[in-house]
Amino acid sequence: MARGGHPLRELDLRTRLGIMRSLVKGVPMANSSPRSGTQTVLTPFRWGLIAVFCLAVLVRLALVFGFEWDEGIVDSYDVIAINLVEGRGFSLNGVDPTICRGPVYPHYLALLIRLFHLTDSPYVFFRIFDSVLDAITAVTLAIAYSLWFPRLRYGAAIGAGILFAANPFMAYYTVFLGSETLAVFFFAAYITLLHPTFVAFRSGLGWPTLQGLLGGILILNKSVFLPVVLVSPALLWVLSGRHLRTAAFFRRASMTLIISGVVVAPWVVRNTVLADKFVFTQTLTGFNFWYDFSMDRNRNQAVASGDLSRSYRGDPVLLPDGTPYHPYSLDPATDAAYDNQQVAAAIDWCKAEPGRFVVKVLDNLAAFWFQVETPAKMAIAGTFSLLLFCLAFWGGRIAAVAGHRKECLFFLLLIGVIVLTYSPVMSKFRYSLVTYPMLTLLGGASLYRLAECSRKVICMIGTRVRSSIGGL
């Protein structure tokens, strides 16, 4: 929609959803520009989505086939997937069921193995499938931008898609085969559906049902999304103003949260039965909490020696009683007991040294955006994060000036919820990938503005060159 047009939210619901169908299908609108003839702003948007998809796939496939990669997946998700396919159940050691990993990514890998009969060295195929999945995420974010920021031109939505598609770290970790790729895909879909469910307030039970299903899948994939799923409807209600019907809104929000709970509940029951004590979607929270707190004790020595990998990986981890700990080899009951023991030990340390705990949280707030293995990689990750922040700030300012202050504030608050959820426990740069959908949406207008400025500069230079040649 051209700048200065009527806000999309002022249209009736049927018209609003009809416009979105036209966006994807490229159907001409009635108010097409006479200058463009039969072509409209929607047809370029459709081709823009295709370009975003192709760019994302090409960037990731260039990494897949341009470099050598290890035969394996971070956090051993492939081991669980292979055990699922071969009938040994959701297990890391092939004997005992495991409760230290969420179910979504391993079942996704197992589904790919079964559907495409990936028996020998499936990792290159995993990387190709994840690359396509990431490209779909880029297209989804472009569509989400056009929903959340209707006062801005569709070129800004394509800019958001390009910003995600060309993101080098998102591409790298997609090919690296981490669970973040699938998490970001579901999160992008969740953000997109928040608009028709709670902002456009599309009638019918389908929208809150689908929203609840996605919320449950997000929590099962990464439990860090639990606060996001819980607070998103509340934040939208607070920021929405008076135009939302309070009773209807809360009925819809309750339905969404109940469905998310129904999706998550069977896995929680399974873990609790196996461990003989309450376990949410997975353990390792205690391990990460205790490990990160004890790791800080060696950080100064690691920095002084120049071996930052020690502060990243730490020494062989010992339990508070001095015995080695490795959750992958434990039965569920022992794993849960050790996890609780580590939580208790970390809490005791925090009570004994509250100042250090505050410093650790503040350190993790910063390390969330650059903490990787070596100083050189830290510098690259930190520089990229700073660049992404600048684009998000500029694009958010453009959107706010156009009348989308509340939308920008909503995405900033979601980023804050995720960062604050991670920072007391553990921070790594890889964890920051789940904030990229919000940063991408905030930064879309900045990329479009850069393209517009570049086009004007090129046109100006071309005009001067033609004038100079004509004067000869």
Image (spheres, rainbow, N blue to C red):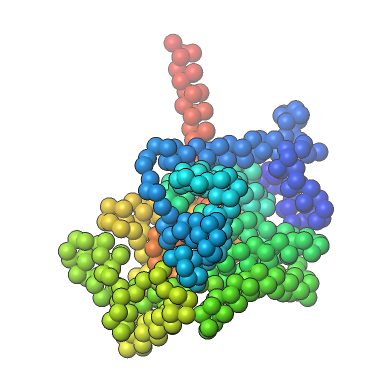
Using residue 1 as the reference point, say whether residue 279 is left or right of it.
Answer: left
Q: Which residue occupies the foreground of this view, 219 or 321?
A: 321
Look at the image and tell me in which quarter the C terminus lies. top left
Residue 223 in the image, given as x and y percentages of width and height: 53, 70
Residue beneath the point at 75% across and 27% down: 37
> Please, which residue is most extreme toward the left here?
305
Which of the 4 image quarters holds residue 404? bottom right
Look at the image and tell me in which quarter the N terminus lies. top right
Residue beneath the point at 50% across and 44% down: 125
Number of residue marks: 0
Q: Which residue occupies the foreground of this view, 259 or 113?
A: 113
Vertical arrangement, residue 405 with respect to residue 31, above or below: below
Residue beneath the point at 47% across and 45% down: 120
Vertical arrangement, residue 40 with respect to residue 429, above or below: above
Residue 453 in the image, given as x and y percentages of width and height: 51, 38
Residue 260 in the image, given as x and y percentages of width and height: 66, 70
Is residue 300 something one can see in this rendering?
Answer: yes
Using residue 367 as the reference point, say whether residue 29 is left or right of it.
Answer: right
Residue 444 in the image, given as x and y percentages of width and height: 55, 48
Residue beneath the point at 57% across and 80% down: 273
Using residue 50 as the reference point, say whether residue 173 is left or right of it.
Answer: left
